[in-house]
Amino acid sequence: MESASRALVESVSRDNPIPLYLQIKEFWRKQIEGGALQPGDQIPTDQELCERYDVSRITVKQAINALVNEGLVIRRQGKGTFVAKPKLQQDLLKLTSFTEDMWQRGLVPGASLLSKELIPAPSEIAKSLQLKEGEKVVRIQRLRLADNEPLAVETLYVPYAVCPELLGDDLGGQSFYGLLENRYGLRLNKAEQFLEGSLATKKEAHLLRIREKDAVLLTERITSLEDGRPVEFAKSVYRGDKYKFHVVLHRHP
Ligand code: 16G
């Protein structure tokens, strides 16, 4: 910490046209991304930073807020500022389940069932699932957990006709894709997925243990079987500070 702080003093210059808060923020970002600071490490208090760089509290707050917004540090009320755990990354190349994604990262996946019911498909959902409006779908809402921490709120719509048995299954502790493939012999083929930024509703914030209107990542996925029938319309709301998606783009695919 001491050597990092000395380097920081050298790295912040009033002659530099880059605003002071950005210079401070960039220094700490490099320390974190370069591995000099590890998740859980504390960074100096706002007061300490003000004194060391002879800058105002507002400048320090701007620098720390920028680090918070990038998910690099978290503030703990009354305790200080700490290096955050890196965001979980989902590679958008292969059709994988939440369970597979978490195991791959060495985290224990979990799900707690919020609701499960048979409903007539709302028109948008019916269109995505190639159903007639009003045809029956099983709607399942689950809170998805990684190492017992809430990560996403997921709502699945599954055509009742494709998998009527699902209504009787306990989806709290089980992988949905696992059930489809291993118990019901349905073969998943591909999914189309949409991503957008959004703000947490009151209910989502409560479930995800964040504040209302905090940034979240909203995804919609329509998954189909090898015979072409759509099997799910899934809407998931991920904590924006914990999750990111990764895509590799080829200029000449
Ligand atoms: C992921 C999928 C969701 C799928 C679920 C199955 C995204 C955005 N969504 O959460 O569509 O239903 O995995 O997970 O990736 P499970 O097999 O672990 O229940």
Image (cartoon, helix red, strand yellow):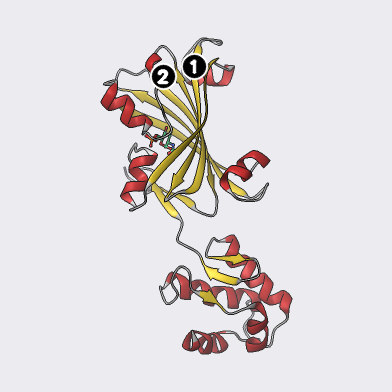
Kindly identify the residue that appears in the image at 68 percent across and 72 percent down.
Answer: 61
How far apart are the alpha carbons under marks 2 and 1? 14 Å
Kindly state the secondary structure of the residue where label 1 is placed. Answer: strand
Figure check: 136 above or below 7: above
Where's residue 2, x and y in %? 49, 88
Where's residue 49, x and y in %? 63, 82
Where's residue 178, x and y in %? 31, 31
Amino acid, disc 1: Val
As drawn, the label of residue 231 is none
Amino acid, disc 2: Gly
Kindly state the secondary structure of the residue where label 2 is placed. Answer: helix
Q: Nearer the viewer, mark 2 or mark 1?
A: 2
Return the residue nearer the eye: 185 or 67: 185
**Ligand 1 within 8 angstroms of badge 1 C-beta:** no
* Contact (Cβ within 8 Å) of mark 2 with mark 1: no
Which quadrant of the figure has residue 13? bottom right
For the question of whether residue 199 can be seen, the reply is: no
Q: In this view, does 197 lie to the left or right of 107?
A: right
As drawn, the label of residue 168 is 2
**Ligand 1 within 8 angstroms of badge 2 C-beta:** no
- Label total for image: 2
Figure check: 40 above or below 14: above
Kindly identify the residue that appears in the image at 61 percent across and 73 percent down.
Answer: 22
As drawn, the label of residue 137 is 1
Where's residue 59, x and y in %? 69, 76
Callout 1 crowding tier (Cα within 10 Å): few <14, some 14–19, many ≥20: many
Figure check: 146 above or below 21: above
Return the residue nearer the eye: 99 or 121: 99
Dot placed on the residue nearer the N-terminal end, 2 or 1:
1
Q: In this view, does 93 lie to the left or right of 52?
A: left
